[in-house]
Each structure stands twice: as C-alpha cells, then as structure tokens.
Image (tube, helix red, strand yellow):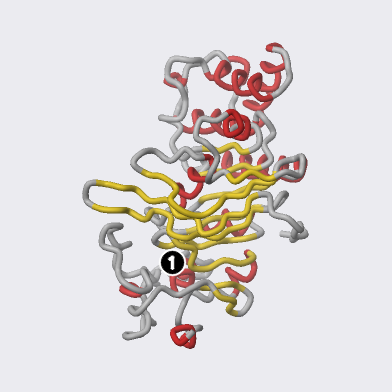
Amino acid sequence: MPQTPMPTDPLIQIRDLQTHFFTDDGVVKAVDGVDLDIHANRTLCILGESGCGKSIMARSILRIVDAPGRIVEGSILYRNAHGGSVDLATARPGSRQLREIRGQDIAMIFQEPMSSLGPIQKIGRQITETIMLHRKVTKAEAREIAIDLLDRVGIPRPAERFEAYPFELSGGMRQRAMIAMALSCQPRLLIADEPTTALDVTTQAQILDLIAELKEELQMGVMLITHDLGVVAEVAEEVAVMYMGKVVERGDVFSIFEAPQHPYTRALLASVPRMGQGRRDRLPAIRGMVPHPLARPAGCAFRARCDHAMPGICDARQPALKPVGRTEAACFLHHKEALHD
C-alpha cells in the first residue's frame, strides 16, 4: 500500500487524555494518558485486546462517554475546516458547537448496531434526518443520497430497505445501514469501531474499499478500531497498540509489522496464522489475562504476562513512550536508563 504524505498539522491532536470511571468499588482508569495524532487522508488503526480502552478513547473524542465515566485530564484539539481549533475535552456537553461537530465533522460507526439504531423509526428516515440536519439539501435530495449510500454499502434493493424498520433487517444489514448513516454527511474524521464485525468477507472488503475511496475523495481522516490484523495491514498508514488504557507502541504500519519493539505487539503479531504453517504447529498465545481494571499492577501493566519482565525494573514504575528503532515503544527492555532520569 503506498504511503500517503504526512500533513503538517493533525486533524485531531490528543494529549495526555485520561477518562476515568468513578464506581462504588473504586476508580477505573479506562484511558490513562493517551497521546495520539490523527491526520487528514490517513488511517490510524488502534489495536489491542478487549478491555484495553480503545472504544472509550473513541467515545471520549465525541464526548459520549456514559456516566459514571468522564474526562478528568488532557486535551482533544480538533482543527476545523476554517483553520480554527476546538478543545473537545473541555467543550460544554450538549453545546451547539459540540452538536454541530458530531455527525457533520466527526462521525462514528458503532460496534453494536442493535442498540445504535432507533427501533421505532424506519432506516431511511433515520439516515435522511441526519443528512438534513447537517447538509443544506431538500427532503427529496436527502432520500436520493440515502438510497445511494445504502446501495454503496452493499444493501440489496436499497429503495425497499429505505422503508424498512431495523427489526426487519439482519444484524449485518443493520451494520451496513449504520455505516451509511456515518458516511452520509461526508465527515472530516470517521471513527470506526469494529465496523465490519458482523459482515461476511466479501461485504467487509466492499465496505473497506468504500471507506478508502471516500477517504481519498474527501481527504477524510480515519480512526479504525479492529482486532483483525489483516485489515490493519491492508488499510492502515499508522498503528497504535493499546494496553490497559495506554498506548504501548505506535508507528507506521510497515515498521510495526516488520520490526515491532514492544513485547505485547510482538505477541499479538505472533498469534496470527501464517501461510505455510504446518497443521500441527501451535500458535503462540499470550499467557494470562488482561488484569482487572481495579487491580492494576504496579509498574508496567503488561509485566505479569511478559516473558522479558525484569524484577526491580518493570515493577518499579511505568515506562514512557520513547523512540525505539522505527517506532515508539513504552518498554524498559529498551530504556533501562530511564529509571535513572
């Protein structure tokens, strides 16, 4: 995949983002000091096991984190089309400014279409309402745009499905309708949380091709959350690997796949089947489980599962992201001297 030139200014600049959940049992640090840049016309893929904070980070950008969660620290600087900037982390919830950005400038494809579509409104009406809210078009024009998008995301007989209720569609159809709704206002940034989970392989390829086409056409930035390393290799320019609310490695897709530096990234890549692998060859597995969020280990959160953990070092404090080879990794395996900073 050819590399898209890196723009000067990021579309979204996230610095020290911390989103915590204040429960009766304690504080869950779902996102714990994340730094990321998302650029126009580039795809950033977020990798990591379930429970590592990927979806909460995405929801934090749109300010739709459910209570008792809230952003407690950090900034989410969004540069709009007019050259101005807005810190989404401090924008007043429910403000007109934030409502105009959601859906129009920044759209999200949610992981679960069953709970993301209104159950008592037809699919077509939900899409056209979104279009007419953010674009200056007539009702007839909005209908044409919606039907065209339903067709482009692979829904057969789109004019008929336009009049269907969500319960009349399969899970895969609902997911495609959600994708059509997210793309309907031609956003500057598309956040896609496992957008092709419920889809067959053929439709998945069609959806990824459509997102790539619109990315080029609209110079749209894409943040894609996925567990599928094949998808990452196909569509990403940049990759960030998350573990326990932190980014443990980030870099361009070629460097991450060819020379991963963090033990967690290496373990994720090693667990993928490869061409030519024997039937009796067992895939390496990451031992243990992601720690309970209320029982976060001291030091490096991955140390209990890491084959390279160093007593007295990895359990002493949390490593910071620092350049290692062609990527940035948060690991004392490469930065033992950091303990003496």
Amino acid of disc 1: Ser
Name the one closer to the observer, 62 or 197: 62
Q: Which residue appears at 37% of the width and 84% of the height?
A: 313
Up-down relation of residue 254 to residue 220 (above or below): below
- Residue that appears at 71% across and 59% down: 1
Q: Residues within 10 Å of mark 1 (few under 14, many from 20)?
A: few
Dot 1: element: loop
Q: How many labels sit on residues?
A: 1
> Measured from the top left, where is residue 52 in percent x and y?
40, 57
Choose top left, top right, bottom left or bottom right for residue 217: top right
Say whether residue 284 is visible: yes
Residue 289 percent location from the top left of the image: 30, 63
Query: Is 291 placed above or below 91 here?
Result: below
Identify the residue at image location x=47%, y=17%.
Answer: 165
The residue closer to the viewer here, 29 or 216, is: 29
Residue where numbered disc 1 is placed:
271
Tell whether 61 sits left or right of 254: left
